[in-house]
């Protein structure tokens, strides 16, 4: 049996002896099922109320039952897509794949054509043979185009035995492939990162050491399990450490952010995490904490996945410090799928924010700046003995750069994936980069950063880098400057990129918001002034679009490269466009990219109907609320849809979930469903049209 020292875990997990060296995540689960069988592993919460719960023994037995069925259906090494809503079944299916030696592929049920296309790409790329589902998702998937086209075996895990007493595990070692996690695909088709048991165990141990998890840690999460931050950084970490996990649904958090903080307080949580937007949402939606909230137990409240803003974390801490929230708990986290999930992190507020000279960063050198300098937060110390080997490298010459110089972040770590599935050339370029004088391969992250006083700082992406007149600008900085130009742009989706016109790079900004012609003209002037003042670069074009046209990755990041391509090829429908003369000939604006129809659909004098449209108008960027348009076509992403459903529930008392519909509903379909349920709730015949009850917002 192959073993490595970092995965021996010193033959102990918090005082509980392990009888053999750990060579797979399955052995860790077996250990906890044997040593603490009746201890809580997962408690699922719906709207803050306790639902299904599993002990470590129940979790193991449920997973083994699934594994036994998979062993009869699929051969080891086969790829199986996981398709579940947020619930314990997702984790049981994932562990069942690991026990059976089947390669799990994390995904989520598609609700519209865009997600379906991504699923089609993933299924084709990994040559999946099966889809695992439960009763909540099985019927939808049975009629799904991708499942039928690829003739995938559809397995309902609720039809398999709950346990297996005769299970014989296949030979699983450190280098056995555990699962595939597909990259966000911000610069191209998603690629499947191959994560073996060595990488998974190493990354979980790195997080345990870096964050200080211990025997009494308590994990809470609403993060989607199909995303690496929710699956690995929280859910699998809790299992690895033998700690309880209180698992919530993402839509519950979006509808009522306070339920997250209530859960942290109720269960005396020590560990949780979220992207930057979640902290902003809490600040916006919870002006005053409840008097009974007690967050003094928190040890790790990690901000990651999105660009980390010190101002957001500081605002969150100031707003909720009255709950006893420790300052040291506010932590940053840097990672990527290619390194399983986690690379480094550390306390944000204790080390404070550093400001760097903008011109110095543009020239590739990190120099201290004034109060107007570029603020950056640390992504963690690299001085700890368990930290991975992180180097800053010149992206073109491949030579290591000294401290304080900006370059590409390269990582050598047991946590690194073993490559991209079916892409040997891309794997060699990304995961096996040689560094002169070093006898080990490095993984190229594509991120720009620097090291200062053994602290890692990340400041951009190489492929998104904007070069204007020889100056390097990062899209995040340009978008931040544009956001500050006008209150209407605050917290709006914004993209920034450069394109060549008349032999010169020009800066273009795309913003998603609902506005009129007069305000749009004002924004054009204000954005140019703000970006010039903060970034020293002229803006040559501003496009104002609907939310649906600002593509995001699965982790919520703006896809600058894809938006640029659509803009240049006339595929970006715009409401308003402002361009300098040099850009007009560059952009081939086709008839397909004409301004969107701004006409408003007639409103029938039905109270539910008008109520829903009133809710919609607070969230969408268009006045065209035609009944045959679905919610995605109106520009609502999953977060906005949950906010819409929450608003409908607040005003009508009717609780709806997106998962209850076979596909994303149109305005008319949503209205009809609310009408039917509302009438039944009041004992009124749903078919009657003369018994309407007036509703007010």
Image: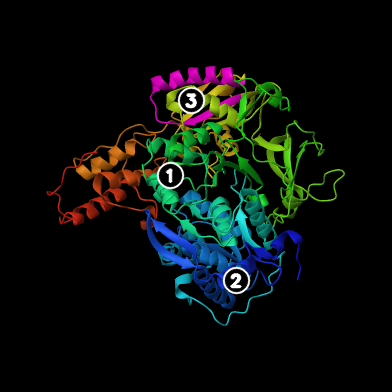
Q: Quadrant of residue 414?
A: bottom right
Q: Earlier in the sequence, mark 2 or mark 1?
A: 2
Pointer 3: what residue?
Answer: 577
The residue drawn where x is 71% and y is 27% is 366
Q: Secondary structure at mark 3?
A: strand
What numbered label is drawn on residue 30?
2
Find residue 187 and report its horizontal and vertical position in percent. 62, 42
| Residue 524 among those drawn in magenta | yes
Q: Secondary structure at mark 1?
A: helix
The residue drawn where x is 48% and y is 20% is 524
Q: Residues within 10 Å of mark 1 (few under 14, many from 20)?
A: few
| The one of 470 and 151 positioned closer to us in this rendering | 470
Q: Earlier in the sequence, mark 2 or mark 3?
A: 2
**Residue 131 in view, yes or no:** no
- Whether residue 694 sits left or right of residue 626 in the image: it is left
> Whole-Å distance between the Cαs marked 2 and 1?
37 Å
Q: Quadrant of residue 137?
A: bottom left
Q: Which residues are magenta?
A: 507-535
Pointer 1: what residue?
Answer: 639
Find residue 665 and report its horizontal and vertical position in percent. 36, 50
Tag 2 near tag 1, CB within 8 Å: no
The N terminus: image quadrant? bottom right
Disc 2 versus disc 3: nearer the observer: 2
Instruction: Name the magenta segment's main secondary structure.
Output: helix
Q: Quadrant of residue 139?
A: bottom left
């Amino acid at each position: 049996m192959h073993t490595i020292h970092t995965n021996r875990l010193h033959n102990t997990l918090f005082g509980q002896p392990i009888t053999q060296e750990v060579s797979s995540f399955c052995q860790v689960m077996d250990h906890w099922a044997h040593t603490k069988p009746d201890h809580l592993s997962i408690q699922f919460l719906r709207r803050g109320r306790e639902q299904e719960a599993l002990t470590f023994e129940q979790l193991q037995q449920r997973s083994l039952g699934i594994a036994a069925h998979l062993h009869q259906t699929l051969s080891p090494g086969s790829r199986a897509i996981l398709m579940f809503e947020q619930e314990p079944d997702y984790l049981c299916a994932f562990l069942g794949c690991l026990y059976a030696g089947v390669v799990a592929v994390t995904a989520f049920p598609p609700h519209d054509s865009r997600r379906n296309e991504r699923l089609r790409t993933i299924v084709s790329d990994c040559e999946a043979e099966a889809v695992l589902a439960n009763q909540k998702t099985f019927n939808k998937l049975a009629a799904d185009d991708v499942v039928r086209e690829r003739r995938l075996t559809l397995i309902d895990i609720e039809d398999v035995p709950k346990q297996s007493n005769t299970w014989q595990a296949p030979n699983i070692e450190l280098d056995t492939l555990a699962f595939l996690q597909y990259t966000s695909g911000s610069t191209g088709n998603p690629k499947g990162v191959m994560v073996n048991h060595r990488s998974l165990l190493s990354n979980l141990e790195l997080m345990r050491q870096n964050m200080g998890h211990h025997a009494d840690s308590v994990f809470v999460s609403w993060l989607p399990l199909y995303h690496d931050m929710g699956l690995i950084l929280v859910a699998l970490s809790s299992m690895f450490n033998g700690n309880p996990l209180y698992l919530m649904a993402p839509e519950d958090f979006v509808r009522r952010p306070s339920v997250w903080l209530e859960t942290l307080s109720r269960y005396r949580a020590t560990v949780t995490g979220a992207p930057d937007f979640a902290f902003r949402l809490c600040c916006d939606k919870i002006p005053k904490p409840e008097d009974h909230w007690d967050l003094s137990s928190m040890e790790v409240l990690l901000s990651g996945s999105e660009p980390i803003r010190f101002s957001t974390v500081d605002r969150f801490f100031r707003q909720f410090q009255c709950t006893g929230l420790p300052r040291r708990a506010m932590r940053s986290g840097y990672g990527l799928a290619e390194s399983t999930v986690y690379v480094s992190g550390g306390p944000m507020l204790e080390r404070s924010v550093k400001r760097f000279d903008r011109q110095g960063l543009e020239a590739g050198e990190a120099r201290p700046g004034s109060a107007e300098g570029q603020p950056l937060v640390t992504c963690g110390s690299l001085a700890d003995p368990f930290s991975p080997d992180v180097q800053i490298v010149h992206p073109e010459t491949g030579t290591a750069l000294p401290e304080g110089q900006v370059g590409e972040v390269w990582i050598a770590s047991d946590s690194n994936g073993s490559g991209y599935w079916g892409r040997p050339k891309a794997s060699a370029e990304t995961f096996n980069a040689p560094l002169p004088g070093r006898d080990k391969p490095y993984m190229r992250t594509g991120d720009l950063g620097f090291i200062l006083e053994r602290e890692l700082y990340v400041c951009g992406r190489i492929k998104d880098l904007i070069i204007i007149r020889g100056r390097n600008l990062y899209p995040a900085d340009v978008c931040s400057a544009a956001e500050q130009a006008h209150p209407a742009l605050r917290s709006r989706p914004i993209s920034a990129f450069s394109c060549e016109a008349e032999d010169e790079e020009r800066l273009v900004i795309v913003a998603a918001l609902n506005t009129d012609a007069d305000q749009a003209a004002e924004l054009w002037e204000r954005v140019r002034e703000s970006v010039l003042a903060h970034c020293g670069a002229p803006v040559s074009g501003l496009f104002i679009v609907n939310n649906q046209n600002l593509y995001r990755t699965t982790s919520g990041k703006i896809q600058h490269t894809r938006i640029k391509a659509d803009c240049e090829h006339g595929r970006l429908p715009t409401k308003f466009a402002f361009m300098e003369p040099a850009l007009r000939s560059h952009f081939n604006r086709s008839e397909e990219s004409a301004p969107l129809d701004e006409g408003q659909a007639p409103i029938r004098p039905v109270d539910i109907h008008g109520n829903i449209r009133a809710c919609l108008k607070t969230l969408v960027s268009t006045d065209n609320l035609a009944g045959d348009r679905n919610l995605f076509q109106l520009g609502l992403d999953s977060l906005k849809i949950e906010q819409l459903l929450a608003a409908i529930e607040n005003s009508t008392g009717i609780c709806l979930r997106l998962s209850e519909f076979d596909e994303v509903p149109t305005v008319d379909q949503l209205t009809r469903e609310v009408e039917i349920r509302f009438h039944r709730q009041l004992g009124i015949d749903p078919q009657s049209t003369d018994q309407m009850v007036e509703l007010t917002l």
